[in-house]
C-alpha cells in the first residue's frame, strides 16, 4: 500500500450526525474499526476512511440517507462486498459510506421469462445457489463473490463474458436512487426496448457517481445440459490466440477461454498444488448438449493441434471442473503470493483480439526488463488480460516501476484501439488514461455528471475530477 | 395520413441560408420536392417539411452544418433511409434535415476482430453484400434496408434479435457530432470496456436528440455453416409460445422465431402468392454446424408436436429460405394492402414472454370488436409483437378507433411490465406512453437532454417535449 497523507477534513456537522442517528439508529456506525473496513481495498491504494457508515436495509433507507447527505453537502459512497480493484468504493473525500450488504434479498425469479430481480447487496454465488432448482443460472463471474449492485456499477465481467456478455448485457433494469433523492426505475422487464434514453446502460459502469443502484433485474440463462472443461498448453502465445480466433470463426460458442502464461501457471501450481506443465496455457469451458459439446471439443482440439497445442486434459466431472476454476479464480492470490507479504497490483487492458499476442509479448518483455515478479492471465476471447505484480511494500521503488510498466501498457493498448480497463473500471487509478483513451468524450461525461449530480456528492473523485 | 395544419414558421434567415450555401454549395437543397421527401414518413403521421436539406459527405460537414445551425438557433434533424415508423425523422419544428445517404462508405473491416466501421449512411444490405467474402455478417435485420446510423439511433432490432441481440449489443463505438459541434468517439474497438460512462449506449436509441451519429463500429458474426428454416402451424397461440419458451429452456439457440396470426398468414399468402395453412404459425431459422442444426431441429420439432404444432415445412436451400423471409419482410405491406389504398399503422409493444399469449389474445379480441382490419405478427422470442392496421384514409373515425385500440394495447403491455416500443422508438407517436411506462425516469432523461442540447435544437419534439 502506498503511504499518502489523507487530506484533513472538518468533522461531520453534529446536527447532521444527529439526523442520521435519528433515522438509522444502530444502523449508523461511527467507530474507527467499521470505518476502516470501508476505507481500505484489496488493491494498492492508500486508506481513505469515511466519516460514517450507514447500513441500509431498503431502497427507501438509501433514498433517505441520500436526501440527508445532499441537504448537508456530505459525500455518499456506496459499498457492496469491497472487492473492487481500482479503489472504486474508497471514500477519498470522506463522507458517508452506504453499506448495502443487508439488502441481499432475491425479490423475484421469473423462470419462464429468464429473469430475476435482486437487491443490490445480493452476492452472485448466493444468487446462483438460489437459482439452481429453476434450471437457470446467472453467468457473469468476475471471480470474487461480489454483490450484484457492485458488479453493475463497475460494469464487471469475467471468465465467461466471451459467451454470455458482461453486466452491460446482463442487466435488464435498475432501481436507482438519484442525487436528488428520487427513486427511479430505468426500464421494464421487456427483453428489449426502444423507449427513450438507455438509462440502464448509463448507470451500469457509472461507479456510483450518478446515483446509487438499489435493485437489479438480470437476464438469466438455462444451465447447460453438458459442461466440459479442458486445459491445453501451447508452444507459443500466438498459437494459443490463433486457436481461439479460429474457434470463434468456426462458430464454436466458447463459454470460457482463459490464457495463463508460464509464470502464472507456475504460481497456480504452487498455490493450488497442481502439476500442469508450466507453459502458456488455455483453460476452456464448453456448454451445450452432449452432442454439441462433443462437436465443439473436436473442432477446438483439431485447431489447437494445428497451432502448436499439446495434449488436452478434459473433464466433465463437476468436482474436477470446480477444482480447475477454483485454481483460476485464485490465480490472483497465487500470483501475488509468489513473494511472502507482497502487495498485489493488477492491470486491466483490453485490445482487439488481433493485437493481443503483440500486446502481451511486448508487455512480457517490459516486465522482464524490470525487477518485480509478474504473471499474465486473461480473458483471451475478449482481448482482455491482466498483469499481476507481486510488490514488496518495503521497496517503494517497486511501486514506481510497476506504475511505469502499467503506463506503457495502457499507452500500448490505447495505440492498438483498446481500452485501459476491460472490467475493473476507472475508479481512482485510471483517470488520466480515460482521457488519453476517449479525449473530448470525457467532457461529455463530465456534462452528464454535473447535470445529474450538481453538488458532486455521489462518490466524488471517481472516474474523473471535475 | 392525418391532416393537420402545420404551425406557421418564419422563413429561414437569409444570412443563415447564405452561410449554408457558401459551405455546402449544391449539397444544400431548398426546393419543395426534396423538402417533401424529407418531410413524409412511411407511417400515418402528418407531413412536416424541413426548411432546407443538406446532403453531408463527411463527419466534418455534419459538424460544420451543426455549428452553423446552432449559431443561428435552427433545428437539425438527421435523415437516413426514411424507413422509421414513429415519425422519428420528421422535422416537426422545421429547420435543416441533414441527409446522410452520401456517407455510405465502409471504412474498415477487421475480420479477425469480428468488427467493422461504417459511415452512418451505409445500408445494412450493402454492408452484408460487402462482407460476404470475409465469412462474416451483420445480423441485425429490421426488414427495411435501413441505414446503420438510423438503426443505431432508433435502437433497431428485428427478426434475429433473439439470437444476436439488438443495436444495443451490436454497436461497439460511435462517432458523434454533439450539439456544440464537437466530434467525439464514444469508445474504442475493444469488445468490452469499463472506461467511464457508456456514451455508446446513451446515443444508441436517442433518435438524434443528443447529437448526430456519423460513424458506427459494429460487431460482426461468422456466417453459420448451416442455415435451416422451417414453418409450422399451431392449434393455439399458447402452444406456439410454449414451444418457443421450452426451446430456449432446452438451450436451443434459435436464430429467428416469428409468430404470424391467421389473418397475417392470409395476407402473406395473398401478397406473396404462397399457400401456407392460414393458422397461427411460427417461422423459424436455425444457425449452426450441420450436426448442431439437426439437433436443434429435432428438439424443436418434438416440442412443437407436444404443443399442438402441425407438420414442419423445412428448407435449407438458400432460394427457398430467401423466399420465406422475403414474405416475412413484406408482411407489413401484405397486411396494409388487404384493403386497396389503405394507410398502415403498426404497434410495437414488448412484454415478458410469459405474458405474451395473454397480451396477444386480449388484443385480438379488442381488434375483433372493432371495424378496422388488422393482423398480428411478432418476434416471439423477445416478447415483441406488432399489430398492423389497414386504415381507409377516407374514414377519419378509423384513425380514432386504431388510436384507442393502440392505447389499450400499450396500457396492457405496461401493466404486464412491458414496454410501449420494442424496436421502433418513441418518435412523435409514443411520448405519452414513455411517461406512463417509466415515470420519473423520464425527468432524468430530460435532464440529460437539457445538459447536452441546451438550446433544444437536435431533432426537437422527439421522445418528449421539454
Image (tube, coloured by chain):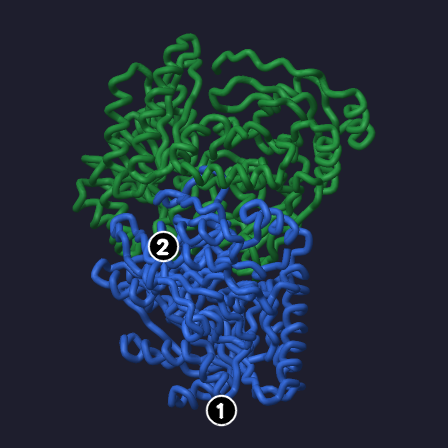
Chain colours: A blue, B green
> What is the spatial separation of the Cα atoms under label 1 and label 2, in whole angstroms?
46 Å
Q: Quadrant of residue B312?
A: top left
Q: Residue at 35% x, 23% y: name it.
A: B270
Q: Quadrant of residue B235?
A: top left
Say above or below: A283 vs B414. Answer: below
Element under disc 1: loop
Q: Considering depth in this image, is B414 or A193 the residue closer to the camera?
A: B414
What mark, if any, has residue A340 been given in the picture?
1
Mark 2, Cα crowd under 10 Å, few <14 / some 14-19 / many 20+, is some
Say above or below: B166 vs A17. Answer: above
Q: Is residue A141 visible?
A: no
Task: Give residue B9's position: percent from left, percent from top.
Answer: 65, 16
Q: How many marks?
A: 2
Mark 1, Cα crowd under 10 Å, few <14 / some 14-19 / many 20+, is few
The residue under label 2 is A23
Which one is earlier in the sequence, the residue at label 1 or at label 2?
2
Q: Residue at 24% x, 50% y: name it.
A: B246
Chain of residue at mark 2: A
Q: Are marks 1 and 2 on the same chain?
A: yes
Left or right relative to A466: residue B22: right
Q: Considering depth in this image, is B134 or B458 the residue closer to the camera?
A: B458
Q: Residue at 41% x, 36% y: name it.
A: B439
Q: Quadrant of the C terminus of chain B?
A: top right
Q: Residue at 48% x, 28% y: name it.
A: B86
Residue mark closest to the camera, 1 vs 2: 2
Element under disc 2: helix
Q: Is residue B44 visible?
A: yes
Amino acid at each position: 500500500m502506498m503511504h499518502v497523507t489523507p487530506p484533513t477534513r472538518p468533522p461531520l456537522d453534529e446536527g447532521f450526525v444527529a439526523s442520521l442517528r435519528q433515522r438509522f439508529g444502530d444502523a449508523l456506525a461511527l467507530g474507527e474499526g467499521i470505518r476502516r473496513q470501508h476505507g481500505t481495498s484489496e488493491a494498492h491504494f492508500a486508506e481513505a476512511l469515511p466519516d460514517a457508515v450507514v447500513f441500509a436495509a431498503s431502497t427507501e433507507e438509501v433514498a433517505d440517507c441520500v436526501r440527508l447527505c445532499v441537504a448537508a453537502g456530505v459525500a455518499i459512497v456506496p459499498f457492496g462486498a469491497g472487492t473492487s480493484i481500482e479503489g472504486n468504493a474508497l471514500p477519498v473525500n470522506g463522507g458517508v459510506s452506504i453499506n448495502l450488504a443487508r439488502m441481499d434479498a432475491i425479490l423475484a425469479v421469473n423462470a419462464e421469462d429468464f429473469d430475476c430481480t435482486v437487491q443490490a447487496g445480493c452476492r452472485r454465488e448466493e444468487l446462483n445457489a438460489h437459482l439452481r432448482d429453476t434450471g437457470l443460472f446467472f453467468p457473469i463471474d468476475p471471480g470474487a463473490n461480489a454483490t450484484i449492485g457492485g458488479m453493475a456499477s463497475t460494469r464487471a465481467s469475467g471468465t465467461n463474458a466471451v459467451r454470455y456478455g458482461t453486466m452491460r448485457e446482463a442487466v435488464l433494469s435498475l432501481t436507482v436512487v438519484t442525487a436528488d433523492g428520487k427513486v427511479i426505475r430505468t426500464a421494464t422487464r421487456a427483453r428489449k426496448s426502444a423507449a427513450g434514453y438507455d438509462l440502464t446502460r448509463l448507470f451500469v459502469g457509472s461507479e456510483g457517481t450518478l446515483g446509487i443502484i438499489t435493485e437489479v433485474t438480470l437476464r438469466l440463462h438455462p444451465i447447460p445440459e453438458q459442461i466440459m472443461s479442458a486445459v491445453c498448453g501451447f508452444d507459443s502465445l500466438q498459437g494459443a490466440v490463433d486457436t481461439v480466433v479460429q474457434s470463434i470463426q468456426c462458430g464454436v460458442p466458447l463459454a470460457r477461454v482463459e490464457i495463463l502464461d508460464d509464470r502464472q501457471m507456475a504460481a497456480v501450481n504452487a498455490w493450488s498444488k497442481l502439476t500442469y506443465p508450466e507453459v502458456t496455457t488455455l483453460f476452456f469451458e464448453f456448454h451445450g448438449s452432449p452432442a454439441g459439446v462433443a462437436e465443439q471439443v473436436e473442432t477446438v482440439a483439431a485447431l489447437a493441434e494445428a497451432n502448436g497445442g499439446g495434449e488436452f486434459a478434459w473433464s466433465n466431472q463437476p468436482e474436477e471442473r470446480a477444482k480447475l476454476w477454483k485454481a483460476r479464480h485464485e490465480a490472483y492470490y497465487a500470483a501475488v503470493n509468489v513473494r511472502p507479504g507482497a502487495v498485489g497490483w493488477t492491470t486491466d487492458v483490453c485490445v482487439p483480439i488481433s493485437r493481443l499476442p503483440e500486446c502481451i509479448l511486448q508487455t512480457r518483455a517490459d516486465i522482464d526488463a524490470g525487477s518485480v515478479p509478474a504473471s499474465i492471465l486473461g480473458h483471451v476471447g475478449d482481448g482482455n488480460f491482466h498483469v499481476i505484480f507481486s510488490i514488496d511494500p518495503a521497496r517503494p521503488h517497486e511501486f514506481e516501476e510497476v506504475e511505469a510498466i502499467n503506463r506503457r501498457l495502457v499507452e500500448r493498448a490505447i495505440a492498438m484501439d483498446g481500452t485501459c480497463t476491460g472490467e475493473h473500471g476507472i475508479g481512482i487509478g485510471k483517470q488520466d488514461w480515460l482521457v488519453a483513451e476517449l479525449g473530448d468524450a470525457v467532457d461529455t461525461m463530465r456534462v452528464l455528471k454535473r447535470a445529474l449530480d450538481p453538488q458532486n456528492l455521489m462518490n466524488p473523485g471517481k472516474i474523473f475530477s471535475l
